[in-house]
Image (tube, rainbow, N blue to C red):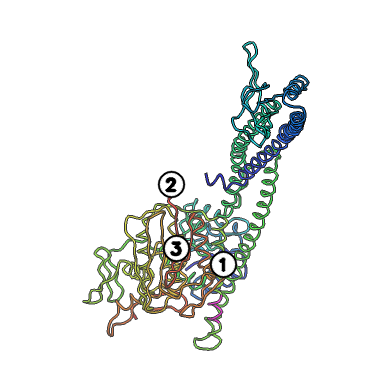
């Protein structure tokens, strides 16, 4: 329900429904003024005028003359029926066509039921009455029928209430339908955006062919995605071609340097330079190999060899592989994982990713430190490496998967700055999330592999 | 050894040929696939170094055609394409080993020697290996030096067994990685050195002679001097 209220289309529909209700209420108010309030005011003035006139007759000409004047008035009344009652000081009714009146006189205009019965038929009337009591105790009531106006008043109120209710119900239902229809199309758009964000640049928003606003928007977004895909493809091909094309010249350079190395006796400055040059070529080779692999992974062109793996086996192999390095650096390396933990993974790629993470931890954790390789199977498979080294700031952690970003390690060894980019690419092809968290103190690198369905 | 080198990049071929000749091998060179196939089928070589992408006839097609004639000469594929799948494709087409460019000449030599030896003497899985006074019993997993029994982990046993099988020949770090650890990955540090160093400490105590020697920039060799 709260999702429905968060929907813009629903809130717009609701807003218009309320706006419509307010409009209906305004129209009803104007109708009331024209058909009820004004005619009522006119009748009030008329009744007041007549009451004044009859009072003047009573005071100037006496009670009998007033009775005659009242009867004359009754006969000469126009569209609306006239009512009156003249009561002598002793309580005797001198003249009256009102069926009843309040026992106590009122200084305000009052509405009095004045239904009449004639030959067994009832006529409904309501009289608007001015009530005067004179000094000698004579009481005079003068009124006019307002039944029709009151009916119009009631009609207007009922109609306004109904219109407001129907408008609200229709507005809510329409809003729900509209928000559902629009929501579905927006969700399709959002789903595509999420898939694109997850690295599938070939994903497109479906176009219905109705040429409506959404179709036009989707077509534009699809064109934009095609353009982005083409640009990414070009960038990837360029880096791949560069890495690829340089391999043969590098091979030439390396064999030539090695030939030179054999000519130069060990220990001379020239030999040292040659060895340095060979080390540089080897480093370039590693960079190109890593770049090619990342590019193939990111471009979805690295065929995956997914197989069911025993994760604890994998981690045991990893720890065993790095144990001598940890021993040499005086770092405690421990494994925390309980069997059974199985997952469908590309074993070589996962070993590469974890090797890169552990390698990094070994580089940055100082001697005497501790590194824990762990895995658990709660809520997807969590595999990670936690250390108590210097850790990373939030800003560094956000940027660290960018290619060629390097930190200062404790041994002053230069990496290629591609290790974590590769981890990110490997995580992506597994549909896994790669996170770097604060281990308080230290760094906790985590791969969250979603449970795979069979 | 008689080596046939099929490589279209002239300068690279020149360097490889001179490196192989300097190591005492006889080298014949072809710069395109068709000539390479003709030479490989008409003459007898101990080992063939074959570039993956060649003009005239692609390296894999050449290899396929060669294997179709029941020629079993060991072939080392050389390629700028180094990805796992490329290697798998190369090995499935009949290649015996695969190296991605750029490569160290010393590693190429080490691998060629290993291939050449395999070609001449079909490998009979030995149960016992012996290098000098180091004895390795692969059945009972016992390694001993003289009267001393050396406790080794399974991995250390596999390392020493691989080195012993190639005794006297250089074994590169990548060869060790491929044959001892069954993961195809690229460690970012020379972690293999640490394993060897640990193994050395166990194999050699007191004034015993070193049996695993480092060949700088290439790898290791197991021998008793």
By secondary structure, the bulk of the magenta-drawn segment is best described as helix
Disc 2 packing (10 Å; few <14; some 14–19; many ≥20): few
In this view, B17 is above or below A170? below
Do the numbered discs 2 and 3 sit on residues whose CB atoms are within 8 Å? no
Query: What is the chain letter for disc 1?
Result: A
Percent of width and height locating residue B152: 28, 71
Residue A278 belongs to magenta span: yes
Q: Nearer the viewer, residue A388 or A61?
A: A61
Q: What is the x, y in percent for residue B71?
A: 47, 55
Kindly check if marks 1 and 2 are in contact, taking CB atoms under 8 A apart as contact: no
Q: Secondary structure at mark 1?
A: loop
Of residues B217 and B7, the one nearer the viewer is: B217
Q: Tell me the mark number nearer the camera, choosing from 3 and 1.
A: 3
- Where is mark 3, residue-wise? A446
Q: CA distance from mark 3 to mark 1?
A: 17 Å
Which chain letter goes with mark 3?
A
Residue B179, percent from left and from top: 40, 64
Compare marks 2 and 3 and give the one earlier in the sequence.
3
Using the rendered view, name the quadrant where residue B126 is placed: bottom left
Furthest-top residue in this view: A119
Q: Quadrant of the C terminus of chain A?
A: top left
Earlier-in-chain disc, 1 versus 2:
1
Q: Tell me the mark number nearer the camera, choosing from 2 and 3.
A: 3
Residue that label 1 marks: A402
Q: CA distance from mark 1 to mark 2?
A: 31 Å
Instruction: Classify A26 as above or below B59.
Output: above
Range drawn in magenta: A274-280
Please identify the residue farthest to the left as the structure is shown. B147
Instruction: Please give the residue where the numbered disc 2 appears in the rendered image.
Output: A453
Q: Are marks 2 and 3 on the same chain?
A: yes
Asked if badge 3 and badge 1 are on a common chain, one would say yes
């Amino acid at each position: 329900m709260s999702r429905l209220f968060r929907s813009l289309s629903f809130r717009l529909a609701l807003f218009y429904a309320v706006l419509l209700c307010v409009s209906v209420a305004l129209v009803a108010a104007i109708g009331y003024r024209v058909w009820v309030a004004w005619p009522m005011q006119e009748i009030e003035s008329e009744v007041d005028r007549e009451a004044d006139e009859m009072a003047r007759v009573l005071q100037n000409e006496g009670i009998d003359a007033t009775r005659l004047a009242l009867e004359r008035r009754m006969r000469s009344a126009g569209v609306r029926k006239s009512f009156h009652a003249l009561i002598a000081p002793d309580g005797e009714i001198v003249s009256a066509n009102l069926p009843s009146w309040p026992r106590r006189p009122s200084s305000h205009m009052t509405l009095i039921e004045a239904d009449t019965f004639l030959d067994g038929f009832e006529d409904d009337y309501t009289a608007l009455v001015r009530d005067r009591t004179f000094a000698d105790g004579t009481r005079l009531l003068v009124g006019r029928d307002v039944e029709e106006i009151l009916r119009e008043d009631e009609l207007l109120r009922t109609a306004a209430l109904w219109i407001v209710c129907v408008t609200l119900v229709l507005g809510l239902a329409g809003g729900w339908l509209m928000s559902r229809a629009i929501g579905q199309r927006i969700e399709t758009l959002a789903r595509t955006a999420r898939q694109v964000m997850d690295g599938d640049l070939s994903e497109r928003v479906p176009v219905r062919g109705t040429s409506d606003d959404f179709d036009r928007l989707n077509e534009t977004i699809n064109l934009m995605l095609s353009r982005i895909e083409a640009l990414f493809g070009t960038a990837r091909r360029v880096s791949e071609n560069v890495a690829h094309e340089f391999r043969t010249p590098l091979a030439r350079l390396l064999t030539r340097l090695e030939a030179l190395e054999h000519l130069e006796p060990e220990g001379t400055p020239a030999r040292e330079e040659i060895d340095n040059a060979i080390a540089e070529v080897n480093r370039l080779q590693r960079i190109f190999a890593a770049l090619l692999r990342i590019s193939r992974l990111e471009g979805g062109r690295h065929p995956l060899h997914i197989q069911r793996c025993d994760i604890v086996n994998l981690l045991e192999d990893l720890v065993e592989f790095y144990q001598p390095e940890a021993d040499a650096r005086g770092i405690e390396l421990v494994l925390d994982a309980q069997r059974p933990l199985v997952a469908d993974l590309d074993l070589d790629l996962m070993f590469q990713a974890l090797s890169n993470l552990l390698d990094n931890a070994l580089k940055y954790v100082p001697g005497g430190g501790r590194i824990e390789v762990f895995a658990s199977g709660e809520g997807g498979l969590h595999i990670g490496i936690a250390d108590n080294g210097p850790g990373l700031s939030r800003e560094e952690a956000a940027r660290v998967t960018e290619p060629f970003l390097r930190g200062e390690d404790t041994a002053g060894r230069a990496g290629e700055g591609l290790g974590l980019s590769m981890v990110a690419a490997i995580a992506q092809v597994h549909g896994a999330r790669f996170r770097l968290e604060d281990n308080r103190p230290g760094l906790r690198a985590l791969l969250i592999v979603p449970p795979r369905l069979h | 050894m008689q080596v046939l080198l099929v490589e279209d990049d002239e300068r690279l071929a020149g360097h490889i040929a001179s490196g192989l000749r300097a190591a005492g091998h006889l080298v014949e060179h072809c710069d395109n696939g068709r000539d390479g196939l003709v030479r490989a089928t008409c003459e007898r070589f101990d080992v063939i170094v074959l570039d993956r992408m060649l003009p005239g006839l692609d390296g894999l097609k050449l290899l396929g055609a060669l294997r179709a004639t029941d020629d079993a000469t060991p072939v080392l594929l050389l390629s700028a394409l180094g990805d796992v799948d490329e290697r798998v494709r190369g090995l499935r087409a009949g290649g015996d080993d695969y190296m991605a460019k750029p490569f160290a000449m010393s590693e190429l030599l080490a691998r060629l020697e290993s291939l050449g030896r395999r070609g001449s003497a079909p490998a009979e899985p030995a149960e016992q290996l012996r290098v000098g006074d180091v004895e390795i019993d692969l059945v009972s997993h016992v390694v001993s030096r003289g009267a001393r029994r050396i406790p080794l982990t399974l991995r250390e046993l596999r390392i020493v067994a691989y080195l012993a099988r190639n005794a006297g020949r250089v074994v590169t770090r990548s060869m060790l990685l491929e044959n001892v650890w069954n993961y195809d990955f690229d460690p970012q540090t020379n972690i293999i050195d640490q394993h060897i160093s640990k193994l050395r400490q166990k194999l050699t105590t007191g004034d015993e002679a070193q049996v695993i020697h480092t060949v700088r920039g290439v790898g290791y060799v197991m021998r008793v001097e």
